[in-house]
């Protein structure tokens, strides 16, 4: 259950920081879904979320 909550929170943060993170290449990994609904572009960064969650986990384990 914790993993699902963490994944959801990471998706929310990535969606909010998408314009800045896109310059770093986050959001363009294989597994990140991007599609248009009308005039809106929807991004579901599954692979980026897993990568960033894993990096945060490793940093947390080091400290």
Image: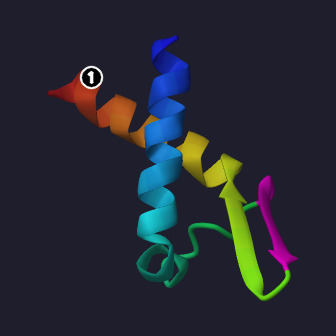
Q: Is residue 37 left or right of residue 52?
A: right
Q: Residue at x 80, y 61 (%)?
A: 33
Q: Nearer the viewer, residue 29 or 45?
A: 45
Q: Position of residue 15 (x, y in %)?
A: 51, 63
Return the x and y of residue 51 as percentages of the image width and height: 55, 45
Residue 52 visible in the displayed image:
no
Q: Residue at x 53, y 34 (%)?
A: 7
Q: Residue at x 84, y 77 (%)?
A: 36
Task: Return the residue found at the far bottom.
Answer: 39
Q: Identify the residue at the far left of this view.
A: 63
Give whichever of 30, 2 is nearer the camera: 2
Examine the rendered structure and indicate whether residue 1 appears above or below residue 42.
Answer: above
Q: Indicate whether residue 4 is drawn in magenta.
A: no
Relative to 23, is 13 above or below?
above
Residue that label 1 marks: 61
Q: Which residue extends farthest top?
A: 1
On the question of residue 10 being in view, the answer is yes
Question: Which region of the structure is painted magenta?
Answer: 30-37
Closest to the observer: 10 or 57?
Answer: 10
Instruction: Please give left or right for residue 35 compared with residue 62 in the image.
Output: right
Taking the spot 56% from the left edge, 47% from the top edge, the residue there is: 49
Residue 38 x, y percent position in the rendering: 85, 83
Question: Helix, strand, or loop for circle 1?
Answer: helix
Q: State the image quarter where residue 26 is shown.
A: bottom right
Q: Quadrant of residue 61?
A: top left
């Amino acid at each position: 259950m914790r993993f699902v909550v963490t994944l959801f929170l990471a998706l929310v943060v990535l969606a909010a920081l998408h314009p800045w993170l896109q310059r770093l290449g986050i959001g363009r990994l294989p597994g990140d879904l991007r599609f248009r609904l009308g005039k809106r572009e929807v991004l579901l960064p599954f692979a980026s979320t897993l990568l960033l969650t894993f990096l945060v986990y490793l940093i947390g384990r080091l400290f």
